Image (cartoon, helix red, strand yellow):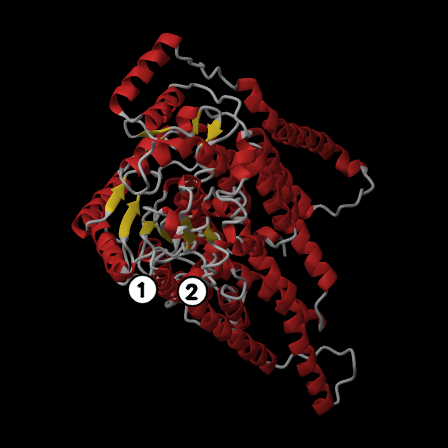
Amino acid sequence: MSRASTQRRDIQGLRAFAVTAVVLDHLLGWPHGGFVGVDVFFVISGFLITGILLREHERTGTISFVGFYRRRAKRILPASILVLAVTVALSYALVGRLRADSIATDGLWALFFGANWRFTTQATDYFAANGPVSPLQHYWSLAVEEQFYFVWPWLMLGVLALLAARTRRRTGTPPGATTRPDHHRLVVGLVLAGVVAASFAWALQQTSAAPSAAYFSTFTRVWELGLGALVAVAAPLCSRIPDAVRPVLAWGGLVGMTASLWLVTEDAGFPAPAAALPVGATALVIAAGTFAERGRQQRFLLPLTNRVAGYVGDISYSLYLWHFPVAILGVVVLGDSPLVLAGLGVVMLVLAVHSYHLVEEPLRSATWRLPRRTSREAGAGRRGTLRAAYTGVFLLALAAAPVMPSLVLADNGVRTLSDADVAAIDAETHAEYTPAVADLQTEIRVALAAGAWPELDPPIEEAMAGREVPSSVMPCGDIDGVDVAACTFGELDRAAGGQSIAVVGDSIAVNYVPLLVGALPEGWSLTSLGAYGCPFTDLLSEHPDAAIVDGCEQRKADVVDAVEELRPDVLVVADMYAPRTEVGEEGTITPERWAESTRTQLGEVADAVGRTVVLAPPPSDVNIDECYNLLSSPVDCVSKVRGQWSGMHDAEAAMAEEMGATYVDSRDWFCAEDRCPAFVGDTLVKVDLVHFSQPYQRLLQPAFTERLGTLGVLPPPS
């Protein structure tokens, strides 16, 4: 039978539902559970592939793996490789070498169906990553599917072969004869049910322990593909469903799928157990439309079986491949205004339609051999030539896309301040600030007026790739344990009036260590006790890296012991002001709750320290990794002091005052009038959302040392 005559319209509608949900979620952030469209795809895929394999085995007594993987390659690779190539090329033309190199590496992993391992290894937080999202991140789902199909057909054939051999021995059937007892499907179903149960149990455990890894893991997703496969195995039972009941079941499934778009959130135990709703609902729709006669179609299900849904289902694979690179790279270059997002939606659709008709379908149906042309085919030759020419134009346009930005790049309108303007700014800052801070403020305000990127030293991409602290300080922030000896800098000389400083907090505390060491007077010492991702509070906050969450409480206990043993004259605490969620709780931690938890934690060491200093982090608003590209201007990367930072500032400042501690406001080191440039002078300020670069530490050092001296944390400057 032809493909058109056997294609199930309800399944095409499910594909349309799934891809529409995913595209809307990634483009507009609505509906907030649109990411469950991927789970719908998994169920569909498990059902269709398993059904094909079962029917082949029942017809021939075996499964042709050469044929199976050839069909998969023709179905998956042409459009996939095209999107990978264009995305990587565009990345080098748009976002700069550093990020493009990372995207190219993502592309290699995606090409060999390992994208999910790549993003798991990076501990990527799918929902709220601090770093820029890869335009190829969506290839993780394709990797999960293909990894499943590298194993499942072999496992199924092994089970069926063992059953066939056992049947032949019992019945005396000669070798080579086809055996198709009904209980073979039952045994395959039982094996599959065990796989599904084990995968779901593992998904429950991993979702709780390591949610980011659980999202991308094959083992936590097998149950979704497996449930679709179970429906295929149970097709004979599904065919007995009364016709009057089928629409009721299908509509129930459709309602469940639709509800999941709003009921399922990233904080609701996803992928397990939350994905059970869209996965189970999809399986219900598929089961309701499974007939004994393959040509029959589900009735009374117009939202899924109409022609528009059918066509969107046809192009769903191409649309899924194109939508994410267009969304990520398009927003990087053009912004995210409603008009831009609408335009990007049109671009996605146009690319998907052309990719489907000119690449995906022709190569899937091609024999990949040159057939002998007959006179009967001569009339179709002209149409084929036109189609080939059209395809060539489409592919040529895609190949030319990476060089187009340089042709349309507009003048950034470089603005430079006159000497008189700079002198006026300098006079104003020196009237308001102490000398070193005033010098820095002048450079900050000049940078805020820039309309184009200057030549930075080191170059911007080299600075972005650099570490935020020297190699001597970097290991001190590891979660595994405290090494007081290796992380103590300077020689303490009490006889000369020297004092000791201990620094606690998260990665921001570690980031400040080189500045504090650079400010140490002769005879003073400093011990770095901060830990990456582990703030010095009495609550435990979520983190994408499960190892940090698991080790944070013990690390804080070790820090408390170290402080009590060191008995430092000054304790400096510094933590990031980014929104956080407490482990086991919903919603972000309020500034007041955060300040109170910091006060409680500091109370554990209050008797062991002489003076406490609360050091504010840099304002965090714009991530340089996300805002910088080859078409951007410095204005695109100017951060602002937002309400989140201000709320944390007010709460911690009030806490410090009540405790008799010193609060050090950091804004004058990074911002002017609540606007913070990405560079100052010829130096990049931050390497990501919040951590400042080592070159900027050197530029900041005089103002930093002066401020601590003015506040009495260090001896006042001479």
Per the image, label 1 sits on a secondary structure element best described as loop
Q: Position of residue 284 (x, y in %)?
A: 42, 65
Per the image, label 2 sits on a secondary structure element best described as helix
Mark 1 surroundings within 10 Å by alpha-carbon count, few (fewer than 14), some (14 through 19), many (20 or more): few
Q: Position of residue 172 (x, y in %)?
A: 75, 89
Q: Is residue 494 left or right of residue 365?
A: left
For the C terminus, the quadrant is: top left
- Identity of the amino acid at label 1? Gly
Q: Is residue 415 above or below residue 341?
A: above
Which numbered dot is residue 551?
Answer: 2
Q: Is residue 397 above or below residue 167?
A: above
**Count of numbered badges drawn on the protein:** 2
- Identity of the amino acid at label 2? Gly
Residue appearing at x 48%, y 47% in the figure: 310
Residue nearer the viewer, 140 or 155: 140
Residue appearing at x 71%, y 70% in the figure: 60
Mark 2 surroundings within 10 Å by alpha-carbon count, few (fewer than 14), some (14 through 19), many (20 or more): some
Q: Is residue 263 visible?
A: yes
Residue nearer the viewer, 485 or 225: 485
Q: Position of residue 612 (x, y in %)?
A: 27, 51
For the N terminus, the quadrant is: bottom right
Place residue 205 in its image quadrant: bottom left
Q: Closer to the N terminus: mark 2 or mark 1? A: 2
Residue appearing at x 25%, y 59% in the figure: 606
Task: Specify the farthest residue to the front.
Answer: 495
Q: Is residue 10 visible?
A: no
Q: Is residue 241 above or below residue 5?
A: below
Pair 2/1: label in front: 2
Residue pointed to by mark 1: 584
Residue contact at pointers 2 and 1, CB within 8 angstroms: no
